[in-house]
Image (cartoon, grey):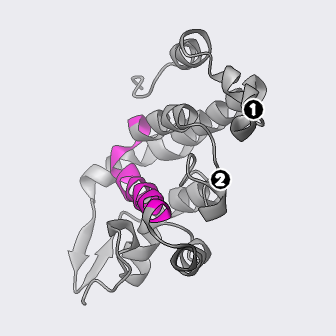
Amino acid sequence: MAQFIADRRDVDFVLHEQLRVETLSEHEKYAEFNKKTIDLIISEARNLAVKELLPIQADGDREGARFEGGNVTVPESFHKAWDLFKEGEWVALSNDPEWGGQGMPVTISLAANDYFIGANFAFMVYPRFDPRCRQTGANIWNRSTKKTVFKKDVHRGMDRYDAVDRTGSRIGCGRIDHCGS
């Protein structure tokens, strides 16, 4: 199979030799993101991309998402991959941990997401919406609103895919309402 995703040596070169991302661990905010941790994150992201997302890439093209009878459905193969994506906490890598993110440097998040997007763009359309909306809410909402919205959202899996595919709400669109409203 052709190489659809970034070569690991290229990613390591950019992260460690050009950007020297491990120096971010010198700052208190990113103290836990040393070279060993960064390499582990990137390795796991690549593993998920190659083993789970790449094999179901064609399903996104063949089956696609459908809107029928007021419900959105996605290819059946996306469900297992989505569960693994959530379990690995890959949804909001660089967002503030207080509001459901991992708090990692954006550079590391971008490198991980390059693997995911390269492996299966159709799948990645779903989770890419939510972190940006979440970050916008974290920046503009008061603490009370954040506690209400994000706590509810995190318990639902902190994801647009679940919201659209299973419940019909539009969390990923930056609103919390029902598609029919």
- Disc 1 marks a residue whose amino acid type is Thr
- Magenta highlight: main SS: helix
Q: Which residues are magenta?
A: 118-139
Residue at figure coordinates x 56%, y 76% from the top left: 156
Mark 2 falls on what kind of element? loop
Residue 58 location in percent, x, y? Answer: 33, 46
Which residue position holds label 2?
Answer: 88
User: Few, some or many C-alpha atoms within 10 Å of disc 1 (few <14, some 14-19, many ≥20)?
Assistant: few
Q: Vertically, is 49 above or below 18?
A: below
Q: Vertically, is 66 above or below 63?
A: below
Which residue position holds label 1?
Answer: 37
User: Few, some or many C-alpha atoms within 10 Å of disc 2 (few <14, some 14-19, many ≥20)?
Assistant: few
Q: Which image quadrant is residue 164 in?
A: bottom left
Instruction: Give the mark nearest the N terminus, 1 or 2.
Output: 1
Residue 178 location in percent, x, y? Answer: 32, 86
Residue 57 location in percent, x, y? Answer: 38, 45
Residue at figure coordinates x 43%, y 65% from the top left: 140
| Magenta region includes residue 75 | no
Whether residue 93 sits left or right of residue 5 in the image: it is: right
Q: Which image quarter holds the N terminus? A: top left
Q: Nearer the viewer, mark 1 or mark 2?
A: 1
Most extreme residue toward the bottom is: 181
Q: Which image quadrant is residue 87 in?
A: bottom right
